[in-house]
Image: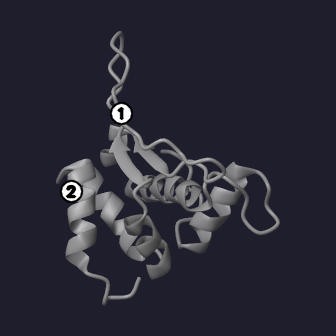
Amino acid sequence: MSTDLPQQQLDVFVTQALGEGPLAVRALHVLRALPREVVDDFLADPQFRIAVDDYQPGKGRTVWLACPTIGNGSRSVILKPRLAECDAAFAYYIIAHELAHAHLRNGGYGSIADPEHAADALAAEWGFGKVARR
């Protein structure tokens, strides 16, 4: 990503969404590696959100998301807290994969119609190829 993007804007966005812990550090690592136009698009879109999955057994979850607009797909990324503790390469891949879904609005990529394969392909293009969970 270009260094002229105000780093503070990205830092503030991630800190507000994820706090200041290891998950935020990992999300920032991935976001800083993305092309500038992708990050600019995320930061300029009020439909784009990143949140931590706060699931509690027996209680459910309370994650507030922006509703997708008609024909625009979801731009919400929900990250599991365990991504802060697992192998870093695996966490980076998962975060990039989920950001790819948001960028593609859960659609295809080039000739790849399946959203899961499309997100994997774009994440790999960004430098975060699929990594097996260890």
The kind of residue on which mark 2 rests is Thr
Residue sitting at x 63%, y 57%: 119
Q: Nearer the viewer, residue 132 or 119?
A: 119
Work out which residue is located at the far top of the displayed protein and give it: 58
Name the disc covering residue 73, or none: none
Name the residue at 53% across, 45% down.
68
Pick out the residue farthest to the front: 70
Q: Is residue 84 above or below residue 113?
A: above
Callout 1 amino acid: Val
The spot of residue 70 in percent (x, y) is 62, 47
- For mark 1, give the secondary structure: loop
Residue count near mark 1 (Cα–Cα under 10 Å), binned few <14, some 14–19, many ≥20: few
Q: Which residue is mark 2?
A: 15
Location of residue 79 (image quadrant): top left
Q: From this view, report whether residue 95 is shown above or below residue 67.
A: below
First reached walking from the N terminus: tag 1 or tag 2:
2
Q: Does the CB distance between marks 1 and 2 fall below 8 Å?
A: no
Instruction: Work out whether 13 lies above or below 79.
Output: below
Residue for point 21% across, 53% down = 16
Query: Quick one: quadrant of the N terminus?
Result: bottom left
How crowded pointer 2 is (Cα within 10 Å; few <14, some 14-19, many 20+) is rated as some
Q: Which residue is mark 1?
A: 63
